Image (spheres, helix red, strand yellow):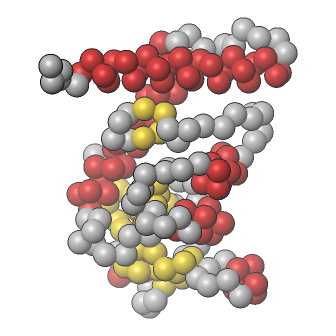
Amino acid sequence: MWHMGLRLPWTWRLGPSNSSERDHVKEMLEQEGFPKNALFCGDAGFVGYPLWSAIVAIPGANFLVRVGANVNLLSEQADVKKKGDGIVLCWPKGQMDSGAPPLRLRLVHVKVGKTKMWMLTSVLAPTRLGKKQIIRFYKMRWGIEVEFRGLKQTIDRHKLRSRNSDRLLVELDWSIRGMAYAELLALREKIPSTK
């Protein structure tokens, strides 16, 4: 996870190449602390009732995620696609059968650059999270991709040196820590001195 305001890594998990990023996020949500009123922003891979339920279970937390055809939503209105933005429900059949309540969410159609996309958020009131803010936050989310590029190119970790899987994870963990520390020092230099 990456703090968009600070532009620094917040927390992370490491695993084999076939591990689930969503499961890593759910683990972080259960084990880590987050700022009050956190807004978790994600791209199209971070979808699904279990993940979204875990986020909204954190007091004051909400999410904003890009969605596509991989997400099925129910509408409180006749037809979301014709009607446009509005309140929708995420309530998969398995959750219905188990008696779990639906997630009431807001679907918003935005244009980021030249690309039109659908964004889904647990913030129901447009006055609390408007389209301009959604676009701004989605653009800020791109910083995590730059962070990955920095790890691979600037820190030269596109290929790890360790030959043992346990050491490889330690090498990667310390590489991320080292990069975060260097970025923290750079951020500190930008703060004006009050002496």
Q: Can residue 81 be seen in this view?
A: no
In the figure, 17 relative to 103: above or below? above
x and y percentages locating residue 128 in the rendered image: 27, 68
Q: Give the residue furthest to the left.
A: 195
x then y, percent, for residue 10: 50, 38
| Left-right relation of 118 to 177 | left
Q: In this view, does 55 lie above or below 195?
A: below
Residue at 38% of width from left, 70% of height from top? Answer: 123
Number of numbered discs present? 0
State left or right for residue 63 relative to residue 157. left
Q: Where is residue 156 in the image (x, y as percent from the top left)?
A: 56, 10
Nearest the viewer among 146 and 33 is 33
Res 117 seen here: yes
Furthest-front residue in this view: 195
What is the quadrant of residue 11 in the picture? Answer: top right
Q: On screen, 152 above or below 38?
A: above
Left or right: where 78 falls relative to 94 = left
- Residue 191 picture quarter: top left
- Which residue is nearer to you in this view: 83 or 46? 46
Q: Residue at x 72, y 21 (%)?
A: 170
| Furthest-right residue in this view | 164
**Vertical relation: 79 (above or below) 41:** below
Residue 29 percent location from the top left of the image: 60, 54
Where is the C terminus found, in terms of image quarters?
A: top left
Query: What residue lies at 30% left-to-right and 53% top-to-bottom?
Result: 135
- Which of 175/84 is in front? 175
In the picture, measured across the screen, residue 44 lies left or right of residue 77, that is right
